[in-house]
Amino acid sequence: MKLQAPKLLVLFLAGLLIFPTALFAQDTSPPPPNEGELSREELWAKLRAEKRSRVEPGKLSGFESGMLWLETKGLKQILNFNYRGLYTRFNNNMSTGSGFAPGLRYWQPDRLAARFDLEATAAWSFRGYQSYGLQFGQIQRKGKIFSLEPVGTGPAFQFDEMEPKEAGFFVYGDLNYRYFPQEDFFGIGPHSLEENRTDYKLEDMSYDAVAGWQINRWLGAGIRVGYLQVNTDPGTDKRFPDTHDLFTDESAPGLAEQPDFLDVSGAVMLDYRDRPGNPHKGGMIGVYFSRFDERAGSRYEFNRLAVDIRQFIPVFSEQRTVALQLYGSADSPDAGAQVPFYMMPTLGGSESLRGFREFRFRDKRVLYFSSEYRWDASPAIEFAAFYDTGKVFGDRSEFRFEHMEKSFGGGLRLKTPKAVVMRFDVGRSREGTRFFFKFSPAF
Amino acid sequence: MRRKHLFLLFVVLLVFCSAAQAQKFRKDDPVWEDNDRQPIRQPAEVDDLSQLADFLENTFSHKPDNPIPRAENVNSLGEVPDSSWFTNRMSRRVLTIEELVKGPNRRKGPDTSQPWVIKGGKTQGITPGFRAHDSKGDLYFIKFDPIGYPQLATSTEVICTKFFHAFGYNVPENYIARIRREDVKIDPDAKITDENGVERKWTEDDVERIFEKVPVADDGTVQVVASFRLEGEIVGPFRYYGTRSDDPNDIFPHENRRELRGLRLFAAWLNHDDSRSVNTKDTFIKQGKLGYVRHHLFDFGSCLGSGSVRIQGRRAGNEYMLEWGPILKAALTFGIWDRSWRYIDYPKHPSIGRFEADYFKPELWRPEYPNPAFERMQNEDAFWACRIIARFTDEMVRALVRTGELKDPAAEEYLAQSLIKRRDKIVRHYLAQMSPLDDFEITSQEGRPAVGFSNLGEISGLGKADSYEYQWAAFENQTGSLKPLGPVEVVAAPAIALPRAGGTGYLAVVIHTLAQSQKGREKPVTVYLAQSPLRVVGVERE
C-alpha cells in the first residue's frame, strides 16, 4: 500500500513527538541565559514584580456588588426594610384573591417599664384592597397574632401560625380596618352557579380586646371581646355585575343593611407540629367558638363553632409526608335570626378547593377535607400532589356525603427549614384550572 | 513484566520532560519558603462577600478545566513552602502534644480577674455575641452556645482551631472561658445596633437578653469562646479562586494552591462544611509604612457535629445545598428515592451534636456548596494532606479533643473515637491512590550513600511491603531526558544505595512497592537527587 504525503507528514510529526530526545539528546551546548537560569525564589520574585506593575484595587464584580446590596441592604429594604421600627411586609392579612399586597409594619417592642408592645400595620393590594391595624399591649411575640382574627370575609381558617410560640400571657388592644372593594359572591349554598359571579365592596372596622395564655410550646388559649362594624357597597370590578343587582336581601341576607355586632370569641389550640411553618410530622387541633350579638336588633345573631384538625404523617421518611386537614365550621343563628352572607364561611381559592375560584361556595356550614402527598426533592424544594373535597350547606339536616365538590392538582414549594417561602399550586376542578402563587403554605 | 513497566515509565517521563524543554530543577530546589511577605502598600478593605453571590458563583461557575493543572505553589518535593498562607507544622515534623494543645495561642487566655467590659456587638440575630475587654484590656469577641446544647459550638470552635493550626493554617487565638451574668459590665460608650436598625447605647437589658438565650451550667456559669482579635487590619476575606488584584505577593491562583486544595481533606476529617470564603479573613500586617497580607481561616463553629447556632444538619457533609442529581432523583420518583444520610443514627450527645464516622466516606464528603479549590483537588494534593492527617496519633487526637474541656466524658470519648475512625478512613482511601512511600532522605547503606524512605502504608497499618523494586537513571535537567543506569533491582529494606558510578549531574530512581496486601503499590514514585551537594531535590508520584 502506498503511503500518501499527508500520512507521511503525520508520521513524521508523531515521530517528533515520541522521540524528541533522539533529535535533541546529543545537543550538549548550554542553554542561552534566560528565565531557566533563575532560582525558584528569583522566578517567583520576578512573577511578583510583574504583578506589581498591574496591581489594582480589589473590587467586587457588578454581580457580586448587586447581590451584596440585595443581601445587606436591598433585600432588607424591600423585604424587611427597617427604619426605626418601620418594616415592609408582604405576607399581609388580606382577603384571598386580593392580589399582591405590600405593606408596612411599625413595631416597637418593650416600650416603657411595663414592656408594652406597639404594632401598626398598613397594606394595600394591587387590586385596591386596603388593611390597617393597630395593636398595643403585651402582644404574643412569635408568629402571627393569636388567631382570633376579627370575623369578616377573611379566610375561614383560623389557625395559621407558622412559628413556634413562646410561652406566656398576652393582653392587648386590637383595632382593624379593612377595605375590600371587589369581593366575589356567587350565591349561597352548594348549588350556586359560576355564571352568577358578582362582586361587592366590604368595609369593616373592629375594636377588640384580646387576652390569652400560651401555656407552653404546644398549648395556648385566648379570648377576644370586641365590637364590629360592617358596611357593604357595590363592588368595583366592572367585569361582573354588582351583588346588589343580582341578589336580594332574601337570597343574600345582610345585603340591604349591615348591623354592628358585639362579639365574644374563645379559642384553644394544641399544636404539636414539628415545625409549624414546614411540618413533616405531628399535628394541630384548633377549636374556635364565637358569639355575635347584633347591637340594634336580633336579626343577625348567631354562634359559630369551628374546628381545624391537621395531621402530618411521614411516610417512612421525612422526605415524604402525607398532610391531612379536616376543617368544619358551623354557624347557628338564633331562632328567627340569620347569618349575614358576608360573614359566612367560604370554600374555594388558594387554601380550599383549589380548583375553584375564591369564595366560590358559601353557606352557614362548611365541611372540607384536604389531603396532600408532599415530597422533598431537596430540603428547599418540595413537590406536592393534592386532592381537596368539601361542601357548604345551610343546615345540619341538609348534609349528605353526596355532591361533594372536588379538586385535585399539584404544587411546587420553595422552603427554608422553618417555613414555606413560596408556593405555586395548580388546581383542577369541574369548573376549570386555577393557578396560585402564594407566599404562604397550603396548610 | 515489571521491568517492562519501568521501561515504559522511563519512556513516558522522557517524552513528558522533553516536550517541556524547560529546566526541571532550579539551583535552590527544594525551596521551603515562599517569600510572599514582600512589603506592599496596605490594600483597601474589600467589602464583605455576598453569601448569595458566593453560593451562586461557586455552584454554577468556577468549574475546573480539563485537565486540571497541577498545584502551582509547591516545591519540587510536592510540599507547600511556608508563606503568608501556610506554615509547615505537622507536614514537616511531628509536633509534641504540648505544641498541639497550645496551638496558635500566645497568651494564657483572657484575664477574668475583673469583670468583662462590653465595648460593642450585637444582641439580635442568630449568633448573639459581643466585643469585650478582659481585665488586662485585651479585646476579645465573645461567642456563645445555642440554648439546649451546652459546649457544642464553643468547644468545637476551640478543638478545631487547634487542629487547623496544627495542619499549618493561620487561625485566630480562641480560648474557652466561663463567665457569669454578673461578670459582665458595659462600657458607657458601648454602642449596639438594635433590631430596629437603630444604633444606641448598650443597656443591662441587652445583656439580660443574651444570657436568656444561652445554656447555663449548674454552677451558674456560661461557657463562651473568647476569640482574640487577629493581628493586623482586616482587609477582607479571601476567595478560593483567582488572586487578590491589589496584592502583588499573591501570584498563585487560589484554586491552584495545594494547601487550599488539600484543605478539603482536613475539612472532611473535621466536617468543616462551612469552609467557604465568608469564613476567611485577610489581615494587613504592618511593617513600618508598608506590610504584607496574611490569610486566615476563621470561624470553626460549624465543624464536627456543631452547626454554630444549632446542631449540625443531617445534610452537612453529605450533599451540597443545591445538588441536581439527588434533587432530580427525588423529584422524578415522587420521593421514593431517598437519601441514605437521613437515616444515620447519631448518639445523643448534646455537646457533640451530629458527628459520626461509620457512614462517613471521605471521597464523598461535601462542603455546603462547591469550593473551587476543593473541586480541583488531585491525588497529589490529597496525598499531601493525607500524610499530614496520618501523622496524628490516637494520643494526639485525644489531647486535642480534651482542649474542648467537654464535661461529659462519654461525649469526649465518642468524639475522639469518631475522629480516629474518620482519620483511618481518610488514610486508607487516599494513601491507596498513590505510592505510599515518603520522607525521602539521603542516608547510608553499608558505607554507601543511599536514598532512605518510609512506607506510610505500613506505618498506617494498611499492609506490609514485601520489597521494593527500583531502577536508577541519569537525569538531564535541561532536557528532562532519563538514561537508565543498570538493571531493575529489588531491595527489602526501605533504603536504596546510589549507583556506584559517580558524577555531578542529577539522578533519578523509580521505585515500586512490591506488596500483595498494600493498595497503591502499583503506583511508582520517582525520586530525583542532585549530586553536588548530594540531596533529594524532587519527588514525583503518578
Image (cartoon, rainbow, N blue to C red):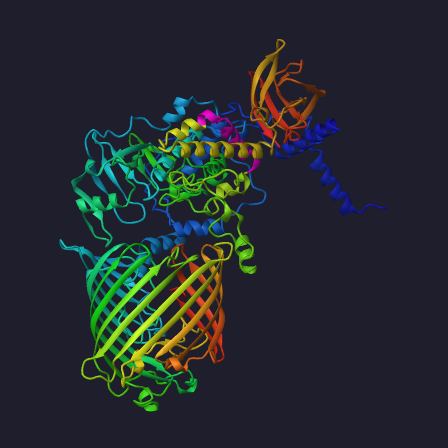
Which quadrant would the C terminus of chain A be assigned to in this image? bottom left
The range drawn in magenta is: B378-396
Residue nearest the observer in this picture, B448 or B132: B132
Residue nearest the observer in this picture, A328 or B455: A328
Q: At which x and y percent is residue A416?
A: 40, 56
Quadrant of the image occupied by residue B408: top left
Q: At which x and y percent is residue A346?
A: 37, 77
Residue nearest the observer in this picture, B249 or A276: A276
Residue furthest to the right in view is A1
Please tell me whether residue A290 is drawn above or below residue B340 in the rendered image: below
Q: Residue at coordinates 35% horizontally, 42% vertically from top-left? A: B149
Quadrant of the image occupied by residue A287: bottom left
Q: Is B514 positioned to the left or the right of B55 in the image? A: right
Residue B384: in magenta span: yes
Q: At which x and y percent is residue A33?
A: 55, 27
Q: At which x and y percent is residue A138?
A: 20, 59
Please tell me whether residue A302 is drawn above or below residue B341 in the rendered image: below
Residue B200: in magenta span: no
Q: Is residue B461 visible?
A: yes
Q: Is B487 positioned to the left or the right of A332 in the image? A: right
